[in-house]
Amino acid sequence: MSHKVEILSVGTELLLGNIVNLDAQILSQGLSELGLNVFWHTVVGDNPQRAREAVDIAKRRADIIITTGGLGPTCDDLTKNVLAGAFGKKLIFHEECAQGIRAYFQRIGREMTDNNLQQAMLPEGCTVLDNDWGTAPGCAFFAEGVHVIMLPGPPSECRPMFQYRARPYLLSLSEGVIASHTIKLFGIGESTMEAQLREQMNAMTNPTLAPYAKEGECELRVTAKAPTDQEAQALLQPTVEQIKQLFGRKVYGVDVPSLEYVVLEGLKARGLTIGVAESCTGGLMAKRLTDIPGASQAFKGGIVSYTNEIKANVLGVPRELLDQHGAVSAPVALAMAQGARQALGCDLALSSTGVAGPDRDDRGNEVGTMFVAIATPEDSFVRPLHLGSRPVRERLRIQTASHAFDLARRYLAGLPYGKQT
Amino acid sequence: MSHKVEILSVGTELLLGNIVNLDAQILSQGLSELGLNVFWHTVVGDNPQRAREAVDIAKRRADIIITTGGLGPTCDDLTKNVLAGAFGKKLIFHEECAQGIRAYFQRIGREMTDNNLQQAMLPEGCTVLDNDWGTAPGCAFFAEGVHVIMLPGPPSECRPMFQYRARPYLLSLSEGVIASHTIKLFGIGESTMEAQLREQMNAMTNPTLAPYAKEGECELRVTAKAPTDQEAQALLQPTVEQIKQLFGRKVYGVDVPSLEYVVLEGLKARGLTIGVAESCTGGLMAKRLTDIPGASQAFKGGIVSYTNEIKANVLGVPRELLDQHGAVSAPVALAMAQGARQALGCDLALSSTGVAGPDRDDRGNEVGTMFVAIATPEDSFVRPLHLGSRPVRERLRIQTASHAFDLARRYLAGLPYGKQT
């Protein structure tokens, strides 16, 4: 029998639109990978009656209920009370939980208020899911033919709690194996990609092929279901190869988290270092590189030059270039990258300059006019971008940084820098 | 009678976790502002039977149902079929809709495939909600005591369709006004804050008080309902003042988006400029400041110094400090801030250095050991942080950057820098 999962999120902040239901997405991804069918997401507020009604509905239609939120002291542990009630269970004090909570506060050096101990009240006979990422422990129990798993609400806790606590519990419930590979592309639009694949996609059943687009990048997820991982992999491999051939140098990796990750790995493999000089991206390139643990093995540093003075004094961009072409120009982008190589003492340097909005610059450059450049021991190259003024500031900055990373990954892969896309 | 709203989203991509339910957040925000109570979010996949069951449940408990998604030709217009069926209505061809769809394709210069005309099939007697942002029109009808509004799924269409089509329709249904203020705090834990407010929170009905925590910050939302905005504001004001007094200098603003926003506003008001020197935050401080449109009025630039060489050569940190104390130390944090003031030519400079993980540094400093410093025309100050090793890298970096911003906002507000929290 194949399982039916409902994700039930508890939190008035979701119903007020203060936050987006990221937990539901995190869990849905993880559950899909386990081959478990998520059929419903439900959100209710911090209201015991409506929460109970939602649980009663979920009980009737699902055989796995995963809740998020409503576990902490600030909401009277609503979720635990309601779920315990719905399944006729009492909440009892779990001393080992209380110890864990006390230890957590000791570790972060904060005084523990007594209301925190309420979090050690859990349904009788449940499996406690220790929370190493916050104070509220989760729990799991099986009753009336339904598996119930309760996880904390903050995504920074919910994510690892699923991965390291709920997932092992659920693994035993899934039948067969779902395996997938994600092929990442840069420099192609989603609709172009889809048009090239549509017929094939429609004809495929196992593996299946699903396209996604975000922030100017595309990805294709190939997913296969089989009794064993080995069999699933054998189903996946030919399709992955075929897609890599079809899209050629636009494919920057398979099962890699990001462009910047590919850049860092390429640098480390060749013993090279990188630095950045940022104007319009304002620190985003450095931030994205240093988001990756171990970035310091290849990333040396960055200079955010939001003024012409810093471009001239710290990066050594010639004043006459700035005067003649303006800060948003190909020559300045090139000089910034070359200057960063010198100032930071790195092998490769990337730069960005452009108009991220909300207004055009004082030389009349439109929002979305961007230049990214690379300087290497052998050459330097600038790529002009016209991203249009419709994407919001944040998206323009993300896309611009990604174009700079694309130059670096092309250099490292021995590919031509190519044109804009 | 006060209305009960259910948002019903249709789309398998939500259940697979491919996308997050941004529509539900957009609509919830907009509905809350109209004083309409959203009590449920439900998500079902592209499955007629489960969609119908979800509609039947929604019909019983809500008197306003707003659907998102499932309107386009690729999903066989599932939502329209299911909703029409649930309310015993037929779908009929709307010629004026067909014209709109033809006109849309003409405008974007694409050929229209015939399946697009299926989108002109809408429930009999409905109000058509023209879609100027895509092809699938929305619609609204009232039947069996329930208002039904159907909106397209892509957030770039759903957002304006709500704002310009659904909102005017709903405006007539809302009674009174909901107004709220959000008080933002830094340097206090959620449970401590909640413990100080619990009795009061439980006693309050209008306004209500709701605490939220994220990334080491806390906020309190005070919400009041009244016939007019003026009356709602009069209800809110005493509570806002009381909370500001209770938490004193931990309150960094009311209805402000972020700490860094408060810092930038404070700088602009005083005609001061700022720069940053970042080690462990790796560009995040600069990124957060430049996320804000108009940051260039006060933000001059930043230096990401991931190596001792850059700390010495670009920021001018004395070699002997680095050798004697190591890069992760109070004296180096101070020297980085002071050096950034010089190198970037700004009035204020902030710095960060620490161990963001995954491993302790080569001097044995634990993950979570951080120093943030500020240098101003009058003084400089360093705040040591022990954030613990449990938060993930990303969270450690966010919290560290926030602590640096907290130093700047305290300087700008004339407050003592204070201790860690």
Image (cartoon, coloured by chain):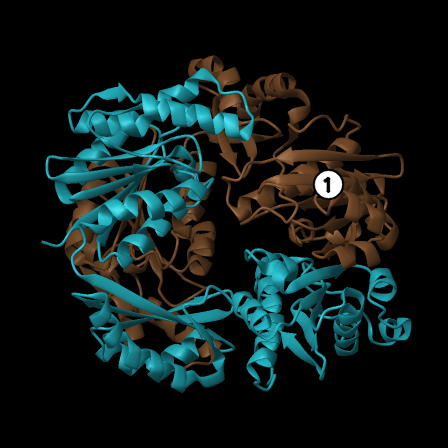
Chain colours: A cyan, B brown
Which quadrant holds the C terminus of chain A? bottom right
Name the amino acid, label 1: Ser
Residue B8 x/y as whole percent: 29, 48
Q: Which residue is mark 1?
A: B329
Q: Who's the residue at 85% across and 69% down the image?
A: A316
Q: Is residue A200 above or below residue B299?
A: below
For residue B92, say whether it is visible.
Answer: yes
Vertical placement of residue B286 versus A97, above or below: below
Residue A149: % across, % down = 26, 38
Quadrant in which residue A56 is drawn: top left
- What is the chain identity of the residue bearing mark 1? B
Instruction: Give the camera-side residue of A196 and A227.
Output: A227
Query: What is the x, y in percent for residue A166?
Result: 29, 44
Answer above or below: position of B226 versus B100.
above
Foreground pick, B32 / B201: B201
Image point 38% across, 68% down: which residue? B135
Q: Position of residue B299 (x, y in %)?
A: 77, 51
* Secondary element type, mark 1: loop
Residue B228 showing in the rendered view:
no
Residue for point 84% across, 48% down: B320
Q: Is residue A9 left or right of residue A224?
A: right
